[in-house]
């Protein structure tokens, strides 16, 4: 195909309407019709990337193969499309300004006054078109973060207006996602907020081509007609997006509403190719009909905000469907795990996952949880900080190194079993300086991880500063904590496991980032399987005791 087509997704009326899911669902449908699609997120905040944001502020920071620390919506894009995103797929105002200011310092603007229009808007337009110009995509979907009318999003809206004008209506279109609130006192759905939001967009010179309306109730034909008339869109371009029980239902709901057809029609692209959603629907079928259920404890410290562990929760959904098991995840705040409470908090579970994290808060609770799982043969999965806690626990309680710790938590630990790599020692900038992105890892044959992956060489995504201290490797191995995954170039330990335990695996990387609907992550699949085994054995043990 000669030229790439662009779809912009803006939001109105309220934040948190799920632009990311709508963008990902549309992309899924277009992909299922054979188009090459990617999605990009533009975020109107001044952080250069979300890597420095507290998870309480913005949810999980998602990491791509090329080491970009990005918005969690990119996780949805990858999970839906089963394709990789990269640095180019997430751009923030901070990054735009940084690059414009750097150009100004280099004198690239030849003495001109540098302004929001045209310099910032040009930079935004360039970033939007980078993906299109790569020649790899037929359609690029760009989601504009924030809500129309926000001061912060104005330069983005102006850039979209200009691009739409430059590219023409058959090459670029705007989808406006909005809310149709239901007033229970009046027993009515209300269109006025949407009319205002479309008008606000119009004040910036943009006419929405398609309205996607979030609603708790079905939109009647009359209401659709009214929305079309007052918002100046075709009636078939009023798309209902009714609340769904799972985000994975949204592509089918959008297919029923004809979202993909309206998009293809306006972009003058063929639509005789029927969407192939066979694999997707097969996953949904298994997700909806579990034969068994297990309960996993997610031990972390950002548990108040579900979005903090988004990719982990989604990876459980994928692995659950694969095993035809419903995985109930209960969050347990590691700060509140004590010797007195631990049995009550953990003993009834079928497995625990000790989560990634930063800083010292909640560390001791995590270590206690690891010990409980190790001593009680409870399936254990440690991710990043969770793996580091397993190394500390083993060093303290099996090797007897009492003050074994991570240098992140105790700078003066006499046994820094988790330490800082040489190249990290002189780093002062916090943003973008961790060990990031995809790194190779070689697995030991005969290990649980080798069984799970079914191959020797894997590559997984990292985001951490601290590492397993190889000085303790021999001691730990001899005491039974095996290192079953090593980086072949650096010799860094990426995986630990206890062979005598039913399932005790800790990984320095983040497997959750690579789990998708089409490719559930092998370690999550194996962990859920181990939890099912544990629950079956435990139940039969309880029955025989009773
Ligand atoms: N805080 C730890 C480190 O930087 C672990 C990071 C993580 O869990 N992502 O090494």
Image: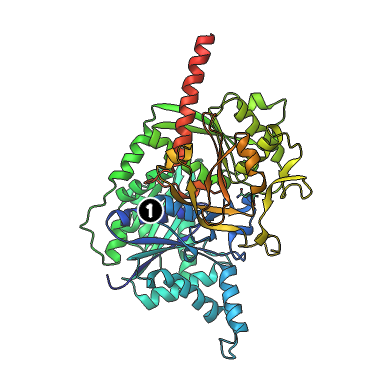
Residue drawn at (54%, 29%) of the image = 500
Q: Report x, y in % for residue 158.
A: 49, 73
Residue 243 visible in the shown view? no
Count of residue discs:
1
Q: Is residue 275 above or below residue 289?
A: below
Q: Position of residue 203 (x, y in %)?
A: 49, 71
Q: Residue at 33% across / 72% down in the picture? A: 169
Given residues 189 and 309, the one toward you in this image is: 309
Residue 486 placement, left or right of 342: left
Quadrant holding the N terminus: bottom left
| Residue 534 visible in the displayed image | yes
Seen in the picture, residue 150 relative to 357 is either above or below; the reply is below
Q: Residue pushed farthest right?
A: 412
How is this picture coloured?
A: rainbow
Q: Residue at x 43, y 54 (%)?
A: 77
Q: Is residue 346 above or below residue 235?
A: above
Quarter residue 129 falls in: bottom left
SS type, badge 1? helix
390 in relation to 80, above or below: above
How crowded is the residue under tag 1: few (<14 C-alpha within 10 Å), some, or many (20+)?
A: many
Q: Residue furthest bottom?
A: 111
Relative to 208, 353 lies left or right = right
Q: Residue at x 46, y 57 (%)?
A: 194
The quarter of the displayed image where residue 105 is located? bottom right
Please state the horizontal and vertical placement of residue 522, each as a whole percent of the image. 43, 41
In the image, residue 300 lies at what x, y percent?
A: 63, 40
Residue named by callout 1? 81
Q: Who is closer to the viewer here, 217 or 405?
A: 405
């Amino acid at each position: 195909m000669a030229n790439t087509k662009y779809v912009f997704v803006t939001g109105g009326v309220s934040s948190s309407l799920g632009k990311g899911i709508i963008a990902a669902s549309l992309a899924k449908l277009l992909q299922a019709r054979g188009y090459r699609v990617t999605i990009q997120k533009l975020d109107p905040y001044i952080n250069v990337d979300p890597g420095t944001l507290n998870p309480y502020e913005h949810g999980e920071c998602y990491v791509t193969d090329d080491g970009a620390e990005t918005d969690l919506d990119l996780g949805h894009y990858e999970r839906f499309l089963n394709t990789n995103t990269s640095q180019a797929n997430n751009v923030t105002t901070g990054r735009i300004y940084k690059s414009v200011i750097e150009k100004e310092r280099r004198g690239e603007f030849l003495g001109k006054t540098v302004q929001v229009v045209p310099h910032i808007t040009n930079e935004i337009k360039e970033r939007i078109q980078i993906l299109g110009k790569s020649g790899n995509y037929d359609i690029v979907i760009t989601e504009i973060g924030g809500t129309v009318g926000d001061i912060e999003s104005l330069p983005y809206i102006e850039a979209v207006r200009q691009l739409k004008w430059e590219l023409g209506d058959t090459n670029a279109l705007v989808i406006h996602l909005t809310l149709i609130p239901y007033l229970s006192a009046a027993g009515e759905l209300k269109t006025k907020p949407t009319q205002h939001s479309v008008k606000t967009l119009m004040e910036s010179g943009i006419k929405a081509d398609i309205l996607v309306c979030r609603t708790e109730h079905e939109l009647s034909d009359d209401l659709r007609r009214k929305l079309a008339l007052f918002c100046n869109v075709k009636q078939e371009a009023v798309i209902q997006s009714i609340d769904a029980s799972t985000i994975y239902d949204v592509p089918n709901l959008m297919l029923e509403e004809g979202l993909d057809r309206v998009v293809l029609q306006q972009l003058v692209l063929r639509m005789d190719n029927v969407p192939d959603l066979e694999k997707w629907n097969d996953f949904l079928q298994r997700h909806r009909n579990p034969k068994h259920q297990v309960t996993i404890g997610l031990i972390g410290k950002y548990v108040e905000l579900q979005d903090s562990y988004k990719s982990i929760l989604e990876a459980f959904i994928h692995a659950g469907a694969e095993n035809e098991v419903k995985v109930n995840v209960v969050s347990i705040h590691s700060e509140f795990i004590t010797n007195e409470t631990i049995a009550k908090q953990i003993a009834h579970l079928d497995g625990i996952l000790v989560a990634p994290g930063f800083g010292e808060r909640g560390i001791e609770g995590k270590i206690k949880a690891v010990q409980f799982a190790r001593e009680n043969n409870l399936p254990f999965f440690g991710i990043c900080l969770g793996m580091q806690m397993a190394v500390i626990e083993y060093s303290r309680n099996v090797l007897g190194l009492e003050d074994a710790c991570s240098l992140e938590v105790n700078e003066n630990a006499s046994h820094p079993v988790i330490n800082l790599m040489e190249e990290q020692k002189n780093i002062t900038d916090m943003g973008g300086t961790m060990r990031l992105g995809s790194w190779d890892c070689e697995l030991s044959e005969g290990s649980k991880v080798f069984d799970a992956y079914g191959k020797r060489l894997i590559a997984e995504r990292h985001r951490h500063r601290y590492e397993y201290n190889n000085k303790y490797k021999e001691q730990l191995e001899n005491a039974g904590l095996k290192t079953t995954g090593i980086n072949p170039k650096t010799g860094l330990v990426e995986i630990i496991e206890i062979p005598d335990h039913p399932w005790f695996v800790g990984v320095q990387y983040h497997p959750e980032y690579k789990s998708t609907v089409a490719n559930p992550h092998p370690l999550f699949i194996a962990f859920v399987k181990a939890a099912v085994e544990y629950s079956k054995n435990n139940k039969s043990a309880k029955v025989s005791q009773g």
